[in-house]
Amino acid sequence: MDAGINKRGESVEDKINKLDVELCKYREQIQKTRSGPVQQALKACAMRLLKQKKMYEGQRDMLYNQTFNLDQVSFAAERLKDAQQTVIYASSSAMSISVCEQFRVLVTIISRDATS
């Protein structure tokens, strides 16, 4: 799932780069033409491309935020698993200590009985 989002993000990034190239061409054409209807038409086309670029940038940012959120959820799940393992080890360790303590008490009782 994460790879799919990254792939879509890269696809949107490619579209943004293509729009940047087109915008550079329009900028050069606008600078070369005199004021008038031709330049106004070029500016209108450039504005349309800028709006598309902003839209794609918003989509890209949204996709990257989704990737970040998925990574955070994955990291939290790993931390929960680690915490669960820690609790399991701690409880088994506590049980071992309890068994050792019981064994020591038993040895003490047996040695007391043996000496009396």
Image: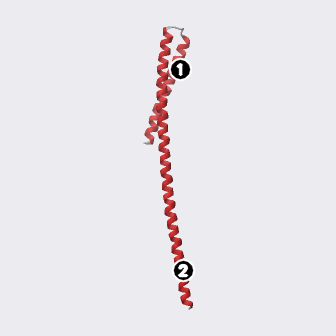
User: Which residue matches tag 2?
Assistant: 105
Three-letter amino acid code at disc 1? Cys
| Image coordinates for residue 105, horizontal then vertical, percent | 54, 80
Q: CA distance from mark 1 to mark 2?
A: 86 Å
Circle 1: element type: helix
Compared to residue 37, the image places residue 85 above or below, namely below
What numbered label is drawn on residue 54? Answer: none
Q: Quadrant of residue 7?
A: top left
**Quadrant placement of the C terminus:** bottom right
Three-letter amino acid code at disc 2? Val
Please name whichever residue, 94 or 25, is drawn nearer the observer in this view of the structure. Answer: 94
Neighbor class of circle 1 (other Cα within 10 Å; few <14, some 14-19, many 20+) is few
**Quadrant placement of the N terminus:** top left
Compared to residue 34, the image places residue 56 above or below, namely below
What numbered label is drawn on residue 24? Answer: 1
Circle 2: element type: helix
| Image coordinates for residue 66, horizontal then vertical, percent | 47, 39
